[in-house]
Image (tube, rainbow, N blue to C red):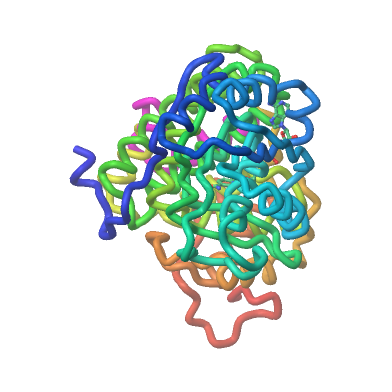
């Protein structure tokens, strides 16, 4: 029973007020906003440029207009959002005194929309709002429409913005939108590589949320369903372009987003640091890190380990190690890089990366405390791409007062 596997913390479980599902559902998003009492006025649509150029905004924009909203489009999202792009979009939102902000695109566009909704009604620039944010004025109502299959940002309180060159986390309960839309039509033509990498991000959300000490029965329930669907359908969705499988993966990535009520753990900390030194899609770095995160966290309670393993392996194994191998194999078949060496990271950087992981992205909810020396040893196995070696490592914090010059105990 999932209740028995819950962790020690019990964070509030937040979810969008309304979730529209099904092909074509984006057309009804405007009416949904109106039904929740959003004032008639102008909606700023914050959109990914590729999505805009592909004509994928038409259903959302048409639906907003049909519901009586004026629409202004800001479609300059190209890559992960920075403080500069936030400032430009926020200026537009303030100039139009918008009554709502809609995000249409991958996690980059949705996270930008959240930041803009905050600045639309509150003073200052985005650098004033890093960390846990409790704005004095409610953020503008949010409508979030994902067009990639992984971040689950349309379900979360998180916005990731690069501020002053550093990837920063904003966490605000009001970033969980009023309306989210899961419209499979919008992911039908997504490039296979984006389905693969964002789908692996969703698997990482599901698995890491299960490891988190703040998992609850609710987060475990949605994570379990999400990971089961993703491991069964992602390959077909990515490599065969199977439309039905893409719809399932989009739905599962939303469930994984809901699981983020428990947060992520070491895997995402490693992923951020990997991408800092070798820029790559977010999901690709998450896929690289996840098997090693499982190895580091091998000492979770046996019943939890068995539950995660059964979920990842479709009931074939109760061993966490088998789950890590299964994730690694899937990522390999999806064509994602499987070692730090393969993404061009030099072994000389590993000590620094271990220190950055622990210092810049600490995770008090990781079930095993994060310490620099064992994370460094873990990174050495990731460098050569050996999940087997990660499982053989001694990962106890190193008490040796005389480590070798690269920081790893002799
Ligand atoms: N807020 C959260 O809870 C949360 C969770 C996970 C990740 N994130 C953040 O989300 C960002 C990554 O988001 P992402 O992985 O979705 O990538 P992304 O939004 O950067 O999009 C990836 C690529 O796909 C293209 N694209 C998007 N939709 C398309 C479509 N339908 N057809 C064709 N091309 C399309 C984009 O132009 C882009 O090139 C990162 O900054 C990450 O940290 C946020």
Q: Residue at x 54, y 14 (%)?
A: 23
Q: Is residue 393 above or below residue 108?
A: below
Q: Which image quarter holds the N terminus?
A: top left
Residue 29 within the magenta-colored segment of the rendering: no
Q: Is residue 145 above or below residue 320?
A: above
In the visual, does 71 lie left or right of 122? Answer: right
Q: Which image quarter holds the C terminus?
A: bottom right
Residue 317 within the magenta-colored segment of the rendering: yes
**Residue 24: quarter of image:** top right
Total residue callouts: 0
Q: Is residue 90 above or below residue 127?
A: above
Residue located farthest toward the bottom when viewing the structure as drawn: 401
| 315 and 16: which is toward the camera | 16
**View quadrant of ligand 1:** top right
Residue 386 in view here: no
| 294 and 39: which is toward the camera | 39
Tell me where the magenta segment starts and ends, as one range.
311-333
Residue 110 in view here: yes
Q: Is residue 330 above or below residue 115?
A: above
Report x, y in % for residue 233.
Answer: 51, 20
Report x, y in % for residue 137.
Answer: 48, 61
């Amino acid at each position: 029973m999932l209740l028995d596997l819950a962790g020690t913390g019990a964070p509030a479980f937040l979810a969008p007020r309304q979730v529209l599902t099904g092909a074509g559902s984006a057309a009804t998003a405007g009416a949904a906003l109106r039904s929740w009492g959003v004032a008639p006025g102008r909606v700023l649509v914050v959109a990914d440029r590729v999505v805009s150029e592909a004509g994928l905004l038409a259903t959302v924009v048409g639906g907003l207009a049909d519901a009586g909203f004026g629409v202004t489009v800001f479609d300059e999202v190209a890559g992960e959002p920075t403080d500069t792009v936030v400032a430009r979009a926020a200026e537009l939102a303030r100039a139009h005194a918008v009554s709502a902000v809609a995000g249409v695109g991958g996690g980059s566009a949705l996270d930008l929309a959240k930041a803009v909704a905050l600045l639309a009604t509150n003073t200052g620039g985005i650098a004033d709002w890093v960390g846990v944010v409790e704005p004095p004025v409610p953020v503008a109502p949010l409508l979030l429409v994902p067009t990639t299959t992984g971040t689950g940002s349309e379900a979360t309180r998180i916005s990731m913005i690069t501020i002053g060159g550093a990837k920063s986390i904003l966490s605000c309960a009001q970033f969980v939108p009023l309306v989210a839309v899961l419209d499979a039509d919008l992911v039908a033509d997504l490039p296979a590589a984006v389905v693969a990498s964002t789908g692996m991000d969703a698997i990482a959300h599901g698995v890491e949320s299960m490891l988190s000490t703040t998992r609850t029965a609710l987060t475990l329930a949605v994570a379990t369903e999400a990971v089961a669907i993703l491991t069964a359908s992602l390959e077909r969705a990515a490599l065969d372009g199977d439309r039905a499988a893409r719809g399932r993966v989009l739905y599962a990535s939303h469930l994984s987003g809901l699981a983020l009520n428990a947060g992520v753990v070491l895997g995402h900390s490693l992923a951020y640091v990997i991408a800092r030194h070798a820029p790559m899609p977010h999901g690709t770095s998450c896929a690289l890190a996840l098997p090693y995160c499982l190895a580091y966290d091998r000492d979770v309670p046996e019943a939890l380990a068995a539950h995660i393993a059964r979920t990842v392996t479709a009931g074939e194994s109760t061993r966490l190690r088998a789950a890590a191998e299964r994730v690694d194999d899937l990522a390999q078949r999806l064509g994602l890089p499987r070692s730090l060496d393969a993404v061009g990271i030099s072994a000389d950087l590993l000590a620094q990366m271990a220190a950055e992981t622990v210092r810049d992205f600490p995770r008090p909810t990781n079930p095993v405390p994060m310490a620099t020396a064992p994370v460094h040893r873990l990174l050495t196995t990731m460098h050569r791409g050996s999940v087997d070696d990660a499982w053989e490592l001694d990962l106890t914090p190193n008490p040796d007062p005389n480590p070798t010059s690269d920081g790893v105990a002799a």
